[in-house]
């Protein structure tokens, strides 16, 4: 029988809670529409978003407490917007450390500084540091408060079998095995995914030779929250050291191992201490007292499944792809998986669409993973050169950077960003996308904006499709009557569509009969959306633009929604 750790994990800063294992006893396990294998950040966020769509889920968590150590620590603005949609962002930001800048050093000199733009219209900072164990704790608390989610602690998936209508599972617990049947299985069980292995699915891409040690220590350093990168320091020549400040006076050290050093040797306490002391001495902090909290070793990999949808089994996060941490891509990419998957799976479960819509999840997210792998590969080859040739190029760049400004942007680590689904099957082919400004092209994330009452546009988006009309400027002072009538007609037959009018007259956000009006200044619309007035945008439930018109023509919205892959409206027509 599966025996998870029943003693709280050791930590200098995180109070671990051991939860009671779930076992259904003699009765059959509670059936939910979805079983999610894996209770890490991606599995828990998937459950919370599914609950927002009214879909129940069971989450199988092999252990009885949240993960050990800090692990994923940097969360992007887009991730925070998704976590806000899941209902946990305020709690997270009460603990997280926001930041905007990063420095790269070589031979004691700063050779590059990254500054990420900040706008008053963005609710969250570009990057936010929080240990994964804290993040999981907040997600667990949110899930425990959600009656549609059952957290099955101490439950390890042993085997499963799927057919056309569902998935049969065998689950091992401290009290024995049980079986259950669910309609869908979501594999969020990480890099060593049991689901992926049992299905015999292979990841495609590259594994790099570079290995990095993660060391978390508690120390008081008078440094701001910024990302620090040290290239080829004297104590670790030819290799790279990264540092991040975390809450609770914890600092993360990531340092590259030489090829001749084994993982076992690297994790010996005396060798970890020697590396930390050498880095602190180089920075002038050799007299600062510190304590070690946690350490691990990881390898840089850039791999993905070629398909994330396998009949009734769906893959998200590290179960679907493995990405290098350079540019904070791992968990941040997984959150985008969850945001894309959940609205499509919910539509299928609720009878609003069929499998054709769900298959667009693979089209969108595999495409995103492959693009990310291309970007991450560039960063990885710079941070951890895989061959002598790449090392020669990297070393030449380092040397030139001491005197020449033009090479310094090569140090940019291409931070994770919201992917643009330019080739999505959901994008309209009968709109004005080609003739409109590329800043908010089809497939891109539609930007939120801060409103006069202190709220943000995203606060007023619901779980359906959003239609946004730009009322500012000469071309859009009056909302077309045909658009208002069309939205009302779609809502009357149960289509989840909401009309938002930006730039409307009035003192505050106002819910009107057939739309919501927002008094946004014309210059803000121009700067934020390149709007001249009269433009119409269709925004998918995951905030990505999928259709847009320079000036609206009657019937365009209904035609677009009716032609979505798998749409029941398409079949009815």
Image: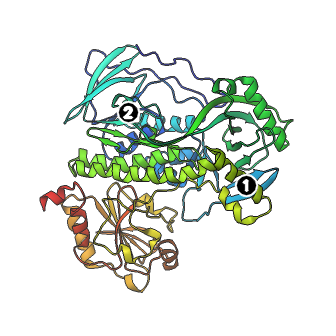
Helix, strand or loop status at disc 2: helix
Q: Residues within 10 Å of mark 2 (few under 14, many from 20)?
A: many
Q: Is residue 150 visible?
A: no
Count of numbered circles in the view: 2
Q: Mark 2 highlights which residue?
A: 196
Helix, strand or loop status at disc 1: helix
82 lies left or right of 363: right
The colour scheme of the drawn protein is rainbow
- Residue lying at the far left in this picture: please name it: 572
296 lies left or right of 478: right
Mark 1 or mark 2, earlier in chain: 2
Q: Quadrant of the C terminus?
A: bottom left
Q: Position of residue 359 (x, y in %)?
A: 29, 49
Q: Position of residue 25 (x, y in %)?
A: 31, 16
- Residue lying at the far bottom in this picture: please name it: 474
Residue 396, disc: 1
Instruction: Judge by depth and name the residue closer to the eye, 439 or 19.
Output: 439
Q: Nearer the viewer, mark 1 or mark 2?
A: 1
Point 66% across, 45% down: residue? 388
Q: Position of residue 455 (x, y in %)?
A: 49, 61
Instruction: Judge by depth and name the residue closer to the eye, 528 or 212.
Output: 212
């Amino acid at each position: 029988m599966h025996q998870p750790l029943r003693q709280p994990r050791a930590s200098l800063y995180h109070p671990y809670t051991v939860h009671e294992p779930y076992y259904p006893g003699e009765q059959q396990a509670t059936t939910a529409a979805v079983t999610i294998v894996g209770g890490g950040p991606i599995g828990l966020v998937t459950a919370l978003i599914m609950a927002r769509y009214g879909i129940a889920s069971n989450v199988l968590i092999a252990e009885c407490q949240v993960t050990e150590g800090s692990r994923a620590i940097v969360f992007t603005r887009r991730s925070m917007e998704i976590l806000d949609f899941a209902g946990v962002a305020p709690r997270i930001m009460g603990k997280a450390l926001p930041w905007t800048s990063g420095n790269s050093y070589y031979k004691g000199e700063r050779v590059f500084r990254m500054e990420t733009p900040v706008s008053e219209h963005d609710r969250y900072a570009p990057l936010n540091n929080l240990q994964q164990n804290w993040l999981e704790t907040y997600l667990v608390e949110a899930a425990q408060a959600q009656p549609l989610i059952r957290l099955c602690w101490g439950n390890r998936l042993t085997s499963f079998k799927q057919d056309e209508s569902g998935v049969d599972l065998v689950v091992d617990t401290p009290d024995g095995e049980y079986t259950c049947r669910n309609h869908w299985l979501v594999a969020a069980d990480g890099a060593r995914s049991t689901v992926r292995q049992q299905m015999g699915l292979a990841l495609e891409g590259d594994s790099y030779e570079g290995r990095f040690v993660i060391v978390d220590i508690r120390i008081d350093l008078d440094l701001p929250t910024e990302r620090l990168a040290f290239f080829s320091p004297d104590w670790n020549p030819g290799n790279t050291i990264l540092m991040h400040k975390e809450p609770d006076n914890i600092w993360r050290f990531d340092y590259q191992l030489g090829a001749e050093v084994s993982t076992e040797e690297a994790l010996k306490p005396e060798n970890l201490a020697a590396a930390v002391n050498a880095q602190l001495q180089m920075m002038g902090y050799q007299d600062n007292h510190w304590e070690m909290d946690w350490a691990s070793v990881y390898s840089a990999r850039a791999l993905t499944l070629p398909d994330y949808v396998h009949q009734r089994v769906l893959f998200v996060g590290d179960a679907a792809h493995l990405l290098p941490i350079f540019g904070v891509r791992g968990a941040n990419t997984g959150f985008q998986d969850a945001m894309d998957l959940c609205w499509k799976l919910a539509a299928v479960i609720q009878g609003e669409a069929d499998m054709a819509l769900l298959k667009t999840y693979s089209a969108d997210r595999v495409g995103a993973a492959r693009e990310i792998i291309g970007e991450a590969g560039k960063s990885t080859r710079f941070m951890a050169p895989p061959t002598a040739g790449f090392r020669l190029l990297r070393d030449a760049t380092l040397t030139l950077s001491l005197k020449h400004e033009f090479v310094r942007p090569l140090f940019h680590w291409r931070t994770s960003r919201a992917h643009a689904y330019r080739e999505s099957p959901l994008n309209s082919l009968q709109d004005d996308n080609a003739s409109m400004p590329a800043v908010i092209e089809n497939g891109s994330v539609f930007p939120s904006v801060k409103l006069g009452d202190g709220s943000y546009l995203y606060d007023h988006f619901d779980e359906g499709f959003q239609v946004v009309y730009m009322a500012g400027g000469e071309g859009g002072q009056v909302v077309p009557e045909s658009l208002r009538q069309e939205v009302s007609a779609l809502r009357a037959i149960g289509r989840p569509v909401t009309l938002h009018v930006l730039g409307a007259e009035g003192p505050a956000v106002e819910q009107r009969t057939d739309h919501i009006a927002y008094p946004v200044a014309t210059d803000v619309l121009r700067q934020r959306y390149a709007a001249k007035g009269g433009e119409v945008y269709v925004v998918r439930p995951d905030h990505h633009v999928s259709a847009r018109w320079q000036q609206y023509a009657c019937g365009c919205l209904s035609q677009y929604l009716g032609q979505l892959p798998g749409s029941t409206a398409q079949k009815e027509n």
